[in-house]
Image (cartoon, rainbow, N blue to C red):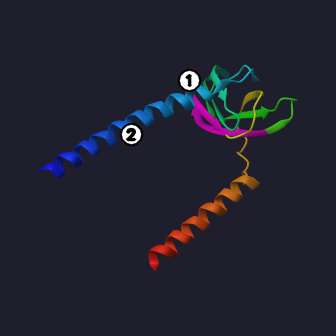
């Protein structure tokens, strides 16, 4: 009976520690996001509103709404965000498909991005196709590392 009580106490301690670490991590990560200083919206119809634009040194997000204030139906609408660095250097674009819009329909969106050291952004709407994105060298390196680790683990488990 003593061993079960000891195990149960360790289990409770582990669960409490897990909960504490999860909550603390959430607040630490949340506080690393800083507002993007300048976020321009291009175009009036359909209307784009950005409620929140935040970034860390390696990634970020935009939260906003799009309202079809035109006189008709819009098909296959996408949000396009262009990101710029400190000196106005173009860092890249990110797209988010929103789908079709009826007249006066409003949709919320959250666009996540992975660019380093964002200082400003321009947000617009487009109906053009989303271009295929090539992997960066950093992403290729991470993929190779993951593949190598998985291969090693598989080999270890097979022996």
Residue 3 vs residue 122, the one in the foreground: 3
Helix, strand or loop status at disc 2: helix
Count of marks overlaid on the render: 2
Rendering quarter of residue 33: top right
Residue at the extreme left: 1
Q: Nearer the viewer, mark 1 or mark 2?
A: 2
Q: Is residue 159 left or right of residue 87?
A: left
Q: Residue at x 49, y 74 (%)?
A: 156
65 in relation to 154, above or below: above
Location of mark 2 (residue): 18
Q: Is residue 134 visible?
A: no
Q: Is residue 88 visible?
A: yes
Helix, strand or loop status at disc 1: strand
Q: Residue at x 66, y 56 (%)?
A: 142
Residue 94 vs residue 24, the one in the foreground: 24
Residue 104 falls within the magenta-colored stretch: yes
The location of residue 9, given as percent across then percent down, is 24, 42
Q: Are marks 1 and 2 in contact (CB under 8 Å)?
A: no
Please state the extent of the stretch shown in magenta in the rendering.
Answer: 92-113
The location of residue 47, given as percent across then percent down, is 67, 20
Magenta segment main secondary structure: strand
Q: Is residue 93 left or right of residue 27?
A: right
Residue 112 vs residue 85, the one in the foreground: 85
Q: Earlier in the sequence, mark 1 or mark 2?
A: 2
The location of residue 112, given as percent across then percent down, is 62, 36
Location of mark 1 (residue): 106
């Amino acid at each position: 009976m003593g061993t079960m009580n000891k195990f149960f106490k360790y289990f409770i301690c582990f669960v409490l520690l897990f909960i504490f670490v999860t909550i603390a991590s959430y607040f630490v990560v949340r506080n690393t996001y800083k507002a993007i200083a300048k976020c321009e919206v291009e175009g009036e119809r359909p209307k784009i509103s950005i409620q929140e634009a935040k970034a860390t040194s390696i990634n970020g997000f935009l939260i906003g709404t799009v309202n079809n204030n035109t006189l008709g139906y819009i098909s296959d609408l996408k949000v396009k965000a262009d990101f710029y660095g400190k000196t106005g250097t173009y860092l890249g674009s990110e797209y988010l498909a929103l789908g079709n819009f009826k007249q006066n329909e409003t949709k919320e969106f959250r666009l996540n991005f992975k660019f380093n050291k964002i200082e400003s952004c321009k947000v617009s709407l487009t109906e053009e196709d989303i271009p295929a994105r090539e992997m960066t060298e950093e992403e290729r390196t991470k993929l190779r590392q993951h593949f190598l680790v998985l291969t090693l683990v598989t080999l270890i488990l097979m022996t």
